Amino acid sequence: MNYGAILATLLVLTVIGFYLGRGRARAAAGAPTRLHSLPGYYGAHVAIWMALPAFALFLFWISFQSAIVEGMVWNGLPDRVAVLGEAKPKNALPAAQKQLLINNIRNYASGDIVSGEITDLVKQGAAAYRRLEVLSSWIMAAAMALLAAIGLLVTYRSISPAMRARNRVERVLLLLLMVASTIAILTTVGIVLSLLFEALAFFTKVSPVDFLFGLEWSPQTAIRADQVGASGAFGAIPVFTGTLLITVIAMIVAVPVGLFAAIYLSEYASRRVRATVKPVLEVLAGIPTVVYGFFAALTVAPLIRDAGAAIGLTVASESALAAGLIMGIMIIPFVSSLSDDIIIAVPQALRDGSYGLGATRSETVRQVVLPAALPGIVGAVLLGVSRAIGETMIVVMAAGLSARLTVNPFDAVTTVTVQIVTNLTGDPEFDSPKTLSAFALGLVLLLVTLCLNVIALRVVQKYREKYD
Amino acid sequence: MDENIAEAIVAAPEADASDAVDAETFRVKMTTRNVNVHYAEKHALRDVTLDIGEREVTALIGPSGCGKSTYLRCLNRMNDTIDICRVTGRLELDGQDIYDDSVDVVQLRASIGMVFQKPNPFPKSIFDNVAYGPRIHGLVSDRADLDQLVEQSLRKAGLFDEVKDRLGDPGTSLSGGQQQRLCIARAIAVGPEVILMDEPCSSLDPIATARIEELIDELRQNYTIVIVTHSMQQAARVSQKTAFFHLGDLIEQGETPQIFTNPRDEKTQGYITGRFG
């Protein structure tokens, strides 16, 4: 039975329940006592208790159904199964082959492509699979109908003028809102945990001390025993230095330009200029970073190299400077737009007070408006730093791969994000330290940006308290 | 006649005495002739002609939206900061046209200080709030002079004794009434001749209000004061001259006791007895 049809039926039943409840409440209102709540609330109360338990059962069922059905199909297969042309005892099958067989059965049942030959075994399993699936969905539909009926019966019978339907509906709404906010938090926890377990797997192969304090990064390891290759070095310091260098360059570009743009727009520009320039500046934020990336790699980097050569400097063609400059330009709208909002929020009374004392515009901006807006601006800059640290595409294209421990902006460096991308893309082995190192890098990166965001939020919060 | 106002006038007998003195030594500090103000299409102020006497308090009263604050902001060209505002007519300070191209508006505002409706201390220490004006105008050459000027200004604003041990605290940490006196000290520190006050007590409690009113009366010895107020008792208590505005027109002006006891215009009569406003 189709899941869509089941849910649609539930919805229709719920709507009917709503009208039934409302009708009964209206009828009850004829009694000498007045209804506690509007009739609609009684209807909603019935509808909620019909829909929610049944829907919860639905979610629960479909998240466990496939595992249970697969287990039953597996048990239903003969004891000796033919895999890759030879018959083997079912229970002695290696885990990977067992998984392959089950996948084939499932894919065949749903009409997808099956790897290898379609054997009788697969056909037999698929038939069982389909049968069980249909059975399962019928049982589920019946259980849902039962729950909805119980909900209807209990809530419908409870309708009386004294019942506080309004308050009960309120409580359920509160619960729904709480569930919604929990989902966001749980997702974050899930991300952290998935990073954490992979990172722990990495740290069983490489010691955390070597990783955090090692000065050499060269993640290439021998894949096969007969291969000539280094054992790999996983000292993350050069990689983090690269991120730091590029971030610093980016912020040197983005903070003054963004801040000055914000000051001009909020304090000097006429309303017309502001209405045009601000959206144009914000278009910068809409340019995909991959476009910035090839602009940096193909236009800016050669330009810097040639300019450096002209004055006798040796500049790598993938220099930290090019990547940092372009990243800074990308971050300008973040800094300027946030700072602009913050500067605008400084009360006009402060400016009036300063003008009233005979201060000029720039004196007012420098000595009154900016100090008042400073905490907010710091918050804006820290959010910009988070962007710079986490930015990937520009540095993948423009910064290079050589993990060199340097602070020379003309050298090629690599960043944390670039290493994560290169170690995880392609055809990686998921048990080699090279691949796993990506998770350790990701974990540290996450912690760093998390700390920055917390600091930024605290600073912004402090600022909010001041002008309430 | 409103009884409270009658009491206020009776309770301030020195007002009559000083009026007699002022009548002899009366000197015009600011003159305004045919002042018109437009906000875009809106005609906010029509043909206002008013003289502001030196070293006395002129109160501007009238219902909300009558143009009294707009008029006040013309006197130190604060309306310049509003794009859509246009001011015409002649406004003079000591005979000098303040809207003349040769006038430096920054200098003008240094000699015509302003105190606002809501206390607006800068996000700085108490000391730096007062030192702000002298610093930007280069009024003092060394730290000792600055210390002295700040202390003097705080004393004149009647705030020094309350804050002398915590001049480094932020200005926003003071109470509302103290903040407003800090703003007055800040205006005094620049050495203005005229102080404009735009409803300076409207966000204060009665005790803080009384304190500010006393202060205004003291400041009158040295400064020309123009005050916009919604409270007719306040106008009666602190001012020597009163001007009544209504819907952008200056309806009536004159000695404060005369306006409150014997108004010539029916509208003034109606407003001060509380029939409208």
Image (cartoon, coloured by chain):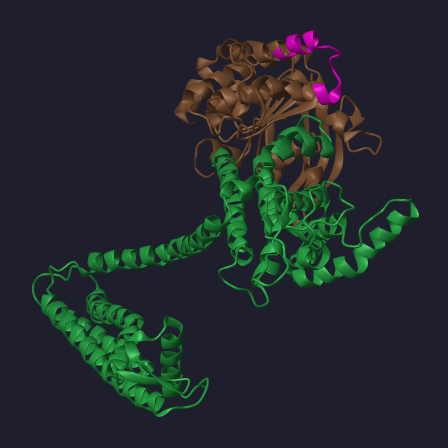
Chain with green colouring: A
Residue visible at 21% across and 71% down in the picture: A50
Q: Does residue A347 sit above or below A338 in this rendering?
A: above
User: x and y percent of residue A174 in the render?
Assistant: 29, 55
> Observer-nearest residue: A88 or B129?
A88
> Observer-nearest residue: A223 or B117?
A223
Q: Looking at the image, can residue A46 be seen?
A: yes
Dividing the picture into quarters, in which one does residue A418 lie?
bottom right
Q: Is residue B141 magenta?
A: yes
Residue, far left: A32
Q: Does residue A98 sit above or below A426 in this rendering?
A: below
Total labels: the figure holds 0
Dividing the picture into quarters, in which one does residue B24 lie?
top right
> Observer-nearest residue: A72 or B277?
A72
User: x and y percent of residue B95 in the render?
Assistant: 79, 23
Quarter holding the N terminus of chain A? bottom left
Q: Looking at the image, can residue B68 be seen?
A: no
User: x and y percent of residue A274 in the render?
Assistant: 69, 51
Q: Colour of chain B?
A: brown
Question: On the picture, is A160 further left or further right than A289?
Answer: left
> Observer-nearest residue: B26 or B54?
B54
Residue, far front: A226
What secondary structure predominates along the stretch shown in magenta? helix
Dividing the picture into quarters, in which one does residue B91 lie?
top right
Q: Does residue A382 sit above or below A139 in this rendering?
A: above
Residue visible at 30% across and 73% down in the picture: A67
Range of the magenta residues? B135-150
User: x and y percent of residue A414 in the render?
Assistant: 67, 51
Question: On the picture, is A394 further left or further right than A306?
Answer: left
Q: Is residue A393 magenta?
A: no
Question: On the picture, is B105 further left or further right than A221?
Answer: right
